Image: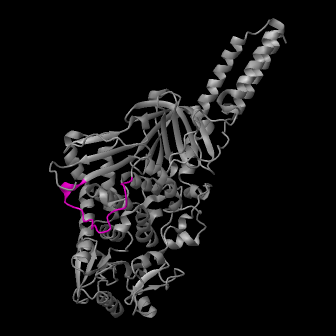
Amino acid sequence: MDRPAAAAAAAAVAAAGCEGGGGPNSGPAGGRRPPRAAGGATAGSRQPSVETLDSPTGSHVEWCKQLIAATISSQISGSVTSENVSRDYKALRDGNKLAQMEEAPLFPGESIKAIVKDVMYICPFMGAVSGTLTVTDFKLYFKNVERDPHFILDVPLGVISRVEKIGAQSHGDNSCGIEIVCKDMRNLRLAYKQEEQSKLGIFENLNKHAFPLSNGQALFAFSYKEKFSINGWKVYDPVSEYKRQGLPNESWKISKINNNYEFCDTYPAVIVVPTSVKDDDLSKVAAFRAKGRVPVLSWIHPESQATITRCSQPLVGPNDKRCKEDEKYLQTIMDANAQSHKLIIFDARQNSVADTNKTKGGGYESESVYPNAELVFLEIHNIHVMRESLRKLKEIVYPSIDEARWLSNVDGTHWLEYIRMLLAGAVRIADKIESGKTSVVVHCSDGWDRTAQLTSLAMLMLDSYYRTIKGFEILIEKEWISFGHRFALRVGHGNDNHADADRSPIFLQFIDCVWQMTRQFPSAFEFNELFLITILDHLYSCLFGTFLCNCEQQRFKEPLPFLAWGAGTQRAHGSLRSRSVLDPGPPDSEFMCFPLHQLQNRLILLVILCGAGQIVLEGLENGVCQLAKNPTLGSKLTLFYIKVVTKQLPNF
């Protein structure tokens, strides 16, 4: 080898050892972008790509082969100038960096299933965007590195409701496409070459990993390997929470009759019941209540001892069946509060629906049978009505909004009306406790949907502890998860039956109601909307074990993953605080939070595209839809804040 060629080879090899931090495992400058999750902490080591030629190691070997060939050629045809070698290496090096930048960041335990280049994402806001699509066993990751800033679409597979093949003739005869309908109101359209589908099975990979339970596989939470310093399952300790409320006391005891979930399989192991009630009588009450869900204490007022208890409907039936033990049980609940000689029973259902349920074996408490009780129907619709309302809402806000018909379109969805009804019902419950010093019983049909919404909202209004981050987590763990809200069925985790009648946005409605309260009383909460969005993110993500099951029994009898959302929020706290989304200081402990629930006080918060990043809000104008977008986030974050009336009220 002559000296110029040898010098060029040495210079190029030296450059290969220095550029990008020295070695095939080096990431792009500035570090690898962390995956979108509740905090943004850097994920663990990168998993190997399925296309090794595009990896730094594969490309470096290929470049060395070309360099050797060029060196041999120089001995025959003459020297190769260092400028030519450097130019060739620079092109390969830039290609390596481009490939690295396009790679999807991975969580520990996450693995790549397919990588497809030259995919077209049809963005409803920005038009067609070309980039690289990566499908893992946790997410769909699309990235375009040619834009500044980079365009990134990061979608956990758990958020996908269904995947459909669509025609893509406009992108060429050999193109095909898919439409991805998401549970968070997004519709994603992708187009790619037919040969890529044949080779990599993009459609099949998405269906397989987005719906693992339908394909005989486990949810990704069971593969997630990240380590945290806390055990998320221990965030909520029921005995400690009841102790915080001053329980047990002379009137109420902590019972372990359900310790093995044999008394009621959808109730928590630890429940609070009146001290004087014996287990035999409690079993008779359970036989008279739907699903065995007897009235149990959720919250007690620290001064008046007025209580919020929750249960399911009584099994009165068309023949007006009675249960003396149940009647005595409710009288005992009333007697435990010396401040009042009355018990208010809030039935969340419509009166007409409760009558229908009675003909089918269900029913409600008759005031003639329960003489010291007052029955109040809150007229809240069932899960099927709420599912249809959200579907209509999606139609009018995504991907575009008809501003000329906006108010009438919103009215037609009835979404705000249902939010108002929930808040109004919770205010009535809280007011009876606080002002009336009267104990209340809350139920719907089975006591795990509307009941959870109402009790948790009322407790949020009455108890400032639940308006802290930790307290809010405990509120959800207690009133929703431990008391058997059917998260797996309502969200449809890992199931490809998108038309399942059990799906409904019950928990989303609750979060919307909480957001309405934070808008009216921002200083009363330790958190704001980004914390709520983080929770919604992981409602769908299947990253943690928190929202995966239908009841507490399932959580503890099946080998669920170690990580619960306590670990996730541990990560989230640092990220959220760094973005100044938490209000300064804890909420005022003396402050009762009773929101104005009239329709004119309502805003719509639609979490269309959830993700981490700074929110930029445009000025709100009455009756006009304002789209809040931060262009630096690409398509990751879009919020709609919409004022729906012209009247401006105080404290809003």
- Determine whether, in the image, residue 67 is placed left or right of residue 326: right
Front in this rendered view, residue 403 or 628: 628
* Whether residue 288 is situated above or below residue 107 in the rendered picture: below
User: Magenta stretch containing residue 217, yes or no?
Assistant: no
User: Magenta stretch containing residue 583, yes or no?
Assistant: yes
At x 49%, y 45%, the residue is 155
* Whether residue 643 is situated above or below residue 631 in the rendered picture: below
Q: Give the quarter of the figure containing the C terminus.
A: bottom left
- Determine whether, in the image, residue 442 is placed left or right of residue 94: left
Magenta span: chief secondary structure: loop
Q: How is the image coloured?
A: one colour
Front in this rendered view, residue 260 or 411: 260
- Determine whether, in the image, residue 95 is placed left or right of residue 232: right
Front in this rendered view, residue 452 or 217: 452
At x 69%, y 11%, the residue is 83
Q: Residues in magenta?
A: 582-602
Q: In which quadrant of the rendered view does residue 522 lie?
A: bottom left
x and y, in percent, of residue 125 in the image:
37, 35
